[in-house]
């Protein structure tokens, strides 16, 4: 089977303080911080994908608000993704994320862009601790706080 480019959607779900839901991956990219998200399905909008994946992975019901950015993520010669980052808001601002797919994520927590950038600057495993689309997003959009 020939290698194909896949489309991933990452949901950037923020709270009132500007912190985002992030979790540590299991499986492909294990040990790396990620946003809720997954593969875009045939016929699905990227907003619908962000809402669906967030509900499946965190139990949070969200509404997608806007496209933030798109990254070109080449993991290897055979694994290539286009990742669409979508800003989302919780329907119930008091609802907290749950680990509904423990085989895919170690757990969810809240982190700010400042937290993420500080982790990178402090060398906490550097780029090893973030999933490639997030690294590419930060490299391509250092002013991400103003976009998301």
Image (cartoon, rainbow, N blue to C red):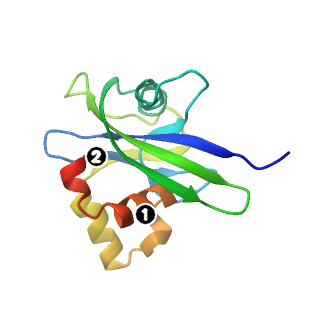
Whole-percent x, y for residue 121 in the image: 31, 77
Q: Earlier in the sequence, mark 1 or mark 2?
A: 2
Tell me: 21 left or right of 1. left
Tell me: 89 left or right of 33. left
> Could you tell me which residue is drawn at 25 percent across and 46 percent down?
148
Of 90 and 45, which appears nearest the observer? 45
Alpha carbon separation for disc pair 1 and 2: 16 Å
* Element on which disc 2 rests: strand
Of 102 and 141, which appears nearest the observer? 141
Of 141 and 96, which appears nearest the observer? 141
Tell me: 50 left or right of 2. left
Quarter holding the N terminus is top right
- Tag 2 residue: 20
Q: Residue pushed farthest left? A: 17
- Tag 1 residue: 135
Tell me: 137 left or right of 6. left
Q: Residue pushed farthest right? A: 1
Whole-percent x, y for residue 33 in the image: 44, 56
Whole-percent x, y for residue 111 in the image: 27, 53
At label 1, counting other C-alpha atoms closer than 10 Å, the crowd grade (few under 14, some 14-19, many 20 or more) is some
> Could you tell me which residue is drawn at 50 percent across and 60 percent down?
132
> Could you tell me which residue is drawn at 48 percent across and 30 percent down?
53
* Element on which disc 1 rests: helix
Q: Is residue 91 above or below residue 16?
A: above
> Could you tell me which residue is drawn at 24 percent across and 40 percent down?
14
């Amino acid at each position: 089977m020939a290698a194909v480019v896949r489309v991933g959607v990452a949901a950037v779900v923020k709270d009132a303080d500007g912190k985002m839901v992030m979790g540590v991956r299991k499986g492909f990219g294990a040990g790396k911080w990620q946003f809720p998200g997954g593969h875009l399905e045939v016929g699905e909008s990227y907003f619908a994908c962000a809402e669906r994946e967030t509900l499946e992975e965190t139990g949070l019901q969200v509404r997608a608000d806007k496209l933030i950015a798109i990254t070109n993520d080449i993991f290897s010669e055979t694994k290539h993704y286009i990742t669409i980052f979508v800003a989302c808001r919780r329907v119930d601002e008091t609802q907290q994320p749950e680990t509904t797919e423990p085989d895919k994520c170690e757990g969810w927590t809240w982190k700010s862009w400042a937290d993420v950038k500080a982790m990178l600057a402090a060398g906490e495993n550097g780029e090893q601790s973030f999933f490639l689309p997030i690294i590419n997003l930060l490299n391509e959009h250092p002013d991400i706080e103003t976009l998301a």
